[in-house]
Amino acid sequence: MAASLIDQIGQLRTHFIKELQDAANSKDLENLKVKYLGKKGPIQSLMMELKNCTTEERPHFGKLINDLKEELVSHCENSLARLKNQEMVDRFEKEWLDPTLPGRRGPLGREHPVTQMLNHALDILIGMGFSVRLGPDVDTDYYNFGGLNFAKDHPARDMQDTFYLSTKWLLRTHTSNTQVHTMENFSPPIRVVAPGRCFRNETTSARSHVFFHQVEAFYIDKHVTFADLFSTMDEFWSKLLGEKVKTRFRPSYFPFTEPGLEVDVLCTRCKGSGCRICKHTGWLEVCGAGMIHPNVLRKGGIDPEVYSGFAWGMGIERPAILKHQIPDIRYFTQNDMKFLTQFA
Ligand code: PHE
């Protein structure tokens, strides 16, 4: 029995080593490991045979079988590591990978030209001491009109001008609604800039759209004068569009200002000779402005005998049109990558 067991151990080792040398890849090796060391493998059968040994022989042969088992396990592990390494080297050679190549860059997003102009305007005004406040896009008649001194029968409230969502709610037609909200919640001194979207039920053309952006700026304090409005606007416009920009101020009327005016910028597209963007006048209207009407201050809980203020509301799309000489406002909302990628 003892001799036969020793023979069997010797033969098993020889067979294993032979098969190990034939193993060509890690899969062969895994199979080999299962074949020899698995539950139904020859090592396990040898273990079973131990019961035929005498009690004196058993520990000795038990150790021999265990040693063989450990030897096979360590052979398998070493070869497996070597083969896996080799397989990796083979793969790199075959697939030819250059780890020094720089990665491929994904396409980078850019800010929309309207967002660029809006942020530029905000940066300038924040630098001049204004703080940003956002008013709601969906608001009531009071904040969009009534609180701004629009008469009940003012044509701007007409269905043709305004998008009504219900009898109570409408889409704001200007950022001036933020004036009313701010006066309700803060007392002077107030120095606020309010950017946002506005909506008007108008026919879309090269220069007007049903939705657009405005930046409202207003300043309320004791002794705020028309001269303050002019000097602030002068500085603002030359910072926004450059020192060489030509502006002109025209008297105008808004129910919420007294007096009111409009700001035109010389059309940079046609340099004043006239084109469809400036309706062939050479000038593009970019901003409404004025001293805040005493009625508006009063409705907002501010005493017009003590305080005064100025306000302006400028469109964002038009200055962007002037800066980049864009022929049609509708380009801004068409999501055409060929257009948008030009504004780095
Ligand atoms: N809200 C006006 C408009 O949309 C602009 C404006 C704002 C005029 C503030 C005067 C003062 O046309």
Image (tube, rainbow, N blue to C red):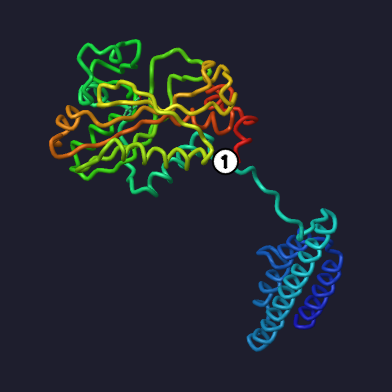
- The image quarter in which residue 292 lies: top left
Q: Is residue 190 above or below residue 286?
A: below
Q: Nearer the viewer, residue 201 or 11?
A: 201
Task: Point out residue 339 in the picture as x, y percentages from the top left corner.
Answer: 62, 30
Q: Is residue 225 above or below residue 155?
A: below
- The image quarter in which residue 285 lies: top left
Type of residue at label 1?
Answer: Arg
Residue located beneath label 1 in the image: 110
Task: Point out residue 53 in the picture as x, y percentages from the top left corner.
Answer: 68, 81
Q: Is residue 51 above or below residue 290?
A: below
Taking the spot 50% from the left edge, 39% from the top edge, the residue there is 116
Please indicate whether residue 336 sits to the left or right of residue 142 in the image: right
Task: Point out residue 60 in the picture as x, y percentages from the top left corner.
Answer: 68, 87
- Is the C terminus in the top left, top right, bottom left or bottom right quadrant? top right
Q: Nearer the viewer, residue 61 or 226?
A: 226
Taking the spot 17% from the left edge, 39% from the top edge, the residue there is 307
Q: Nearer the viewer, residue 18 or 298?
A: 298
